[in-house]
Image: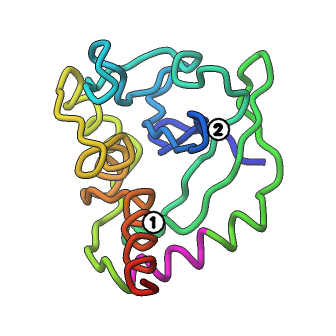
Amino acid sequence: MVRIKFGDVIYVDRNCGIFGYKHFGIYSGNKNVIHYTKGSNNEFDGIIRETPFERFLGNDSSCHVCHFDDEGNRNSTEKTFLPQSFGIQSAAPNLTALLAVTVAKGLYDSIFAEKGKLYSAQETVERARSCIGKRGYNLLLHNCEHFAIWCKTGVEKSEQVEDIIKLVAMTAIKI
């Protein structure tokens, strides 16, 4: 059973109409998460804050914990179901999701070969805290996933953005 630990990169699935997305953050301990939050009424204005875990979760009752290899590459993700008491225990790994992440990682690495390193939990949280109060959210170039992965690896990556780029490229090739 996986537990959310200090310094983990975590995300929740968000549903916004027909499309969904993953909202990322860094678990900073004491039931808090450092992540991009809305900075104003503008959906595309964001500010990095440390908030209670409940705020990060929103209406969700589960989140995902990302795992990395020693070179800072995301190699798996596990879904974690949260009990009322926030004991933060999880179910067994979702093997279909693990396979999908592994295949996507291989494709990603073959196209976007930027390498990082794996920061310790303490370094990850320190990097995240050093950004509290900063703005600069950009859906395509600096979103919550870019931020969280940078905190852990030193490289700004967003598999969600790269998946969209791949989809657009494949569509253009077919046309």
Amino acid under disc 1? Asp
In the rendered structure, find residue 64 and report the number of the disc placed on it: none
Q: Residues within 10 Å of mark 1 (few under 14, many from 20)?
A: some
Please tell me which residue is depicted at 48% across the width and 21% down the height of the picture.
32
Q: Is residue 121 left or right of residue 13?
A: left
Q: Which residues are magenta?
A: 101-109
Which of pointers 2 and 1 lies earlier in the amino acid sequence?
A: 2
- Is 118 positioned to the left or the right of 1 in the image? left
Q: What residue does disc 1 label?
A: 163
Q: Quadrant of the C terminus?
A: bottom left
Task: Give whichever of 151, 144 is nearer the camera.
Answer: 144
The amino acid pointed to by label 2 is Cys
Residue 93 at x, y = what percent?
A: 77, 57
Relative image position of residue 119 (x, y in whole percent) = 33, 54
Residue in the foreground of this view, choosing between 90 and 105: 105
- Relative vertical location of residue 96 with respect to residue 13 in this rendering, above or below: below
Q: Which residue is mark 2?
A: 63
- Residue at 71% across, 21% down: 86
